[in-house]
Image (spheres, rainbow, N blue to C red):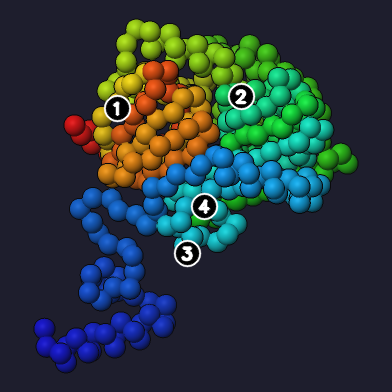
Amino acid sequence: MSKEWESKIKDFISKIEKENLTTFFAATHPKYSTSVFRFTKEPTHVALPYVWKYKLAKERLLELAEILPPEEAERRNINFVNPGLKQYFPAIAAATLPTLRGGIQMLKPGERAYTHRHTANAFRFVLEAPQDGAYTIVEGHKLPMRPGDVILTPNWTWHDHHNEGNTYAIWFDGLDVITAYWLGGVFYQDFSDINVEKYQKITNTSEDVMAKYLGVKPTFESLPSHLPSSDNPLFYYPYSLIRNSLVRLAEKGKGDPYYGVELEYINPTNGSPAFPTMSLKIRLIKGRDELKPIRRTENRVFVVFEGSGTFEIEGQKYVVEPYDVIAIPSWKKYSIRNDTSDNLIIFSYSDEPVFKALGFMREKREE
């Protein structure tokens, strides 16, 4: 094209951008576009693969605990922010991946975090806790917090946290709040907004939850009317049961060459993922085993729980230890190696259900 044409098209693009308009040509052409968006042959994204070391995150959390008392904060936590997403998301969103937030939260002995609820789905994966005394209450159900336990706080469920033990309670928080934020679906409410008290009452136990939904479903009971029908009623997945299942399956073989021995936390009422927007999984990789590289259209966050190993993401290697957090954006090639003779157990969550619902789910297994 002539220089005159190039000058005209640049002037036109500059003019309509000031008017908050654009054209397909201006938005996608590699020479004239000022946007990061492109139609690409394979998925690309500005989010970066990233590893947060637990040692540093915990150090900052303990430092914050000396400065910020729980009564001055809704929740005392340290969130994991993807460096590739900082310029696209407001600070409140604190995006770990394009649709997901992750962070660690802590209560000192004797502390509690007051009751609230929100439309964003969330879960707690317990990292460190006293032998007894730490618990979360979800819709009146008192659920113990022990290392490895997963506790759900689905859409619009009342929940609060307590530590009556003698050591810190630290857990990983995972939420789909980034999805809810950009869709315009975030609602929030404190218990004290509609009640005199700041805390809900205990009406049930973890045993009640397990009795109702572990392999069976009551025919005479439904969710409270204020909860969406899509909510998972099984709020509690004790690690003792999950680990036992992993180990038993591992005794029979190595599992899938790309996933190892992997289990998914499900909604027992319909067999679907734990949340409509998030899939929660846990995998075991046997001693010295190495999983083959894979690409998937999902944004996944891993949390190492037992053992140590190496993640290789797009050719870059990361040595990881217990409680380290690994973010892998959609379609990034990765593999995992167990560097020890002991089992490597890794928890993870992703937006896989969203990709499946939209028909975007793809997987590419590599050698």
Left or right: 221 as drawn, with respect to 355: right
Q: Amino acid at mark 2?
A: Pro
Residue 338 in the image, given as x and y percentages of width and height: 37, 26
For marks 4 and 1 on the same chain, the one whose residue lies earlier in the sequence? 4
For marks 1 and 2 on the same chain, the one whose residue lies earlier in the sequence? 2
Look at the numbered disc 1 and give the secondary structure of its residue.
Answer: loop
Q: Who is closer to the viewer here, 13 or 228?
A: 13
- Seen in the picture, residue 300 relative to 136 is either above or below; the reply is below
Residue 176 in sight here: no
Label 3 packing within 10 angstroms: few (<14), some (14-19), many (20+): few
Q: Who is closer to the viewer here, 230 or 281?
A: 281
Q: Quadrant of the C terminus?
A: top left
Residue marked by disc 3: 87
CB-based contact (under 8 Å), mark 2 and mark 3: no
Look at the numbered disc 3 and give the secondary structure of its residue.
Answer: loop
For marks 3 and 4 on the same chain, the one whose residue lies earlier in the sequence? 4
How far is disc 3 from disc 4 in space, using C-alphas? 11 Å
Label 1 packing within 10 angstroms: few (<14), some (14-19), many (20+): many
Left or right: 143 as drawn, with respect to 232: right
Residue 290 in the image, given as x and y percentages of width and height: 30, 26
CB-based contact (under 8 Å), mark 3 and mark 1: no
Residue 147 disc label: 2
Q: Quadrant of residue 140?
A: top right
Residue 291 disc label: 1
For marks 3 and 1 on the same chain, the one whose residue lies earlier in the sequence? 3
How far is disc 4 from disc 1 in space, using C-alphas? 27 Å
Label 2 packing within 10 angstroms: few (<14), some (14-19), many (20+): many
